[in-house]
Amino acid sequence: MRRIVVKSGAGSYAVVLGSGVLRGAQLELRRLGAATSVQIVSSPEVWRHAGRAIRRAFPGAAAAAKPILINDGEAAKNLRTVETLCRALVRAGADRGTVIVAVGGGVVGDVAGYAAASYLRGVRLVQVPTTIVAISDSSLGGKTGVNLPEGKNLVGAFYPPRLVLADTDLLRTLPPREFRSGVYEIVKYGIIGDVPLFQFLEKNLESLLARKASALEYALTRSVAQKGRVVSSDERESGLREILNYGHTFAHALETATKYRRFRHGEAVGWGMLCAAGLALSHGLCSEAQTERICRLVMRVGPLPAWPHVSSARLIAAMRADKKSRAGKLRFVLATKIGHAETFDDVAESKVQKVLEWVPRYLTRG
């Protein structure tokens, strides 16, 4: 079991990672102070697989017998779902002494996190991530939010959890596609700032995809530790934290253009990393050899959903609405070499368009 401390303006919090972490949930919860109630938020599918473990972990919580269940599809990550959740909290008698426990993947965590930030102007939040994407990325760092039809994560708040309980036993029932989706986020961490992790993935990707415990714990620990370091030094995404968006400008455009129905988030990031690698190469920022290694590793993770029949102009328009753009100017996080990434705002739009045309052909070639 690993305990990684993340610094936040609202106070430091722990990410407890490993097999069987939920067995210590009651002790960890008591460390947060007295709670008038514990309200568990999950989704029907997650609860079907994880409900028994959560009931054992929180035996004294009446909410464990009757959790608040929301749709965890990306298309349901919107203000309507936040309202549904907040109204359910009112009916459950949640007050300012309540602790919300979000059990699920990125959608459940983001929606529950935004609700926790807003409900009664803020109640305590505990994240129990059940996917690789949620463990390695979305459950820590305090970014919560929902989508608008115009773009992804355009409404939200910085609201860090008080605790993250990342029990890797909950990953056993993940469908293969969902598991692979999370691995793309792990690859991202290797590209942007962790050469040993990248090299480990090049040599041990098959072991990770086979869910071997040692490979999974190593990869997740490196990913969580790296994100913890980044968000501890830049909680509000004013500088360094932007590197965590590697591949995400392209990914969010793909998700928006397909109305959040074609891609798992990690799959969109997989496409986005291929695009980012191609864009860096086209600007002479990264060598051909390093670009090839990046693309080869991304493609080895597994099959990606087909590139959508969407024009480059439409994707670029979606990128302009992305929250990372400034005055309508496109900005991209690009890797100049494996293990180092920076933000660039002087990228030629003509080269972005060429990359959007080149990448689907590159994958077909692979």
Image (cartoon, rainbow, N blue to C red):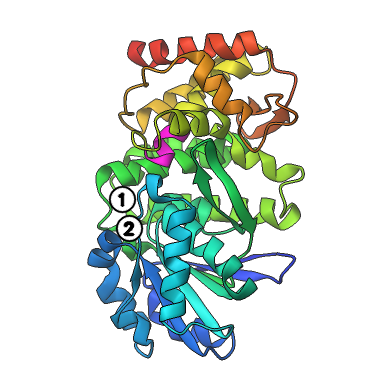
Q: Is residue 121 above or below residue 362?
A: below
Sequence order check: which comes first, mark 2 or mark 1?
2
Name the residue type under label 1.
Answer: Arg
Asked if disc 2 and disc 1 are in contact, CB closer than 8 Å, the reply is: yes
Q: Crowding near pointer 2: few (<14 within 10 Å), some, many (20+)?
A: many
Asked if residue 266 is among those painted magenta in the image, a careful observer would answer yes
* Region in magenta: 264-269
Q: Main secondary structure of the magenta part?
A: helix
Q: Which residue is mark 1?
A: 211
Q: Quadrant of residue 49?
A: bottom left
Q: Residue at x 50, y 56 (%)?
A: 110
Q: Quadrant of residue 142?
A: bottom right
Q: Is residue 226 above or below residue 36?
A: above
Answer left or right for 41 relative to 196: left
184, 106: nearer the viewer: 106
Answer left or right for 229 relative to 38: right
Q: Residue at x 53, y 27 (%)?
A: 250
Q: Quadrant of residue 304?
A: top left
Across and down, in percent, residue 108 comes to 42, 59
Quadrant (top left, top right, bottom left, bottom right) of the C terminus: top left
Residue 159 shows in the view: yes
Name the residue type under label 2.
Answer: Leu
Q: Which residue is mark 2?
A: 171
Q: Which mark is residue 200?
A: none
Q: CA distance from mark 2 to mark 1?
A: 9 Å
